[in-house]
Amino acid sequence: MLFYFSGTGNSKWIAKQIADNFHDKLYSIPDAISSNFVNFELAEDEKIGFVFPIYSWGVPPIVIDFLHSLSFGNTYHNNYLYFICCCGDETGLAPEQFIDALNAKGIKHNSAFSVIMPNNYVLLPGFDVDSHDVMTSKLAAAPTRINQIVEQINKGVDINDCYEGSMAWLKSKLIYPLFVKWGISPNKFCVGDNCNGCKRCERICPTHNIIVNEKPEWGKNCTSCLACYHTCPQNAIRYGRGTKNKGQYFHL
């Protein structure tokens, strides 16, 4: 079985490629949380997989929350477990953070991988989507990387193959906690006059946090995944002044 969290489609695409190769059942983490479907039974030799994006060189809090509540009951017998970090460039110490969370549950990991995909974070100054050339290059390289990962998982190897990048401790230990505290919030989301109330944002939100009554309204259960911003056909969704003149990206 394979659990995934995705906002703008990168991690969902990765998860689908992996699941198709192994004929695995895919489970959306937000859907599992909202339906309180957190108890699963494993077959004796069944592999367990996780795919999630990197949030400011850390693991998205929603993924950690899901892991805290996840249960395999008496069916877990050191089943082979892998996870894949989807990142724009680097993972920082996010893999260590996820491994620590697994260990706290008494669950052992076997392998960890990272896949570089197009950047989508646009909320802070200096952050924007990749140029067309960079985006195209990353997307072209991704299938080869997926094939490498599938081969390693198929062999059942124990490996940590994540690109953590430079100054990983500083980014993951200092910047990530600040991001979790101040950077995950619906408070600055708003829409311009060009919003036509199409409800695309309501449908695409993975946590069902948006309700459109003529104009979208954001609830408190926001993960700052930016699915709403990137999929708005009018480019009407804004985050204060942070998204002014910035691009959109969504992996279909």
Image (spheres, grey):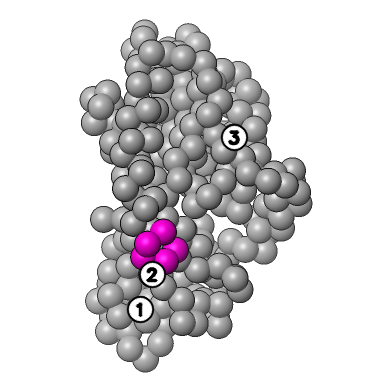
**Pointers 1 and 3 in contact (CB under 8 A)?**
no
Asked where in the image residue 108 lies, by quadrant, the reply is top right
Three-letter code, disc 1: Asn
Alpha carbon separation for disc pair 1 and 2:
8 Å
Magenta part of the chain: 130-134
Residue assigned mark 2: 248
Is 181 situated left or right of 67 in this image?
right
Q: Residue at x 42, y 66 (%)?
A: 131
Q: Please tell me the numbered disc located at residue 95.
A: 3
Crowding near the residue tagged with mark 3, few <14, some 14–19, many ≥20 C-alpha atoms within 10 Å: many
For residue 194: magenta? Answer: no
Seen in the picture, residue 195 relative to 210 is either above or below; the reply is: below
Residue assigned mark 1: 235
Magenta segment main secondary structure: helix
Crowding near the residue tagged with mark 2, few <14, some 14–19, many ≥20 C-alpha atoms within 10 Å: many
Tell me the SS state at disc 3: helix
- Judged by depth in the image, the label closer to the viewer, 1 or 2, is 2
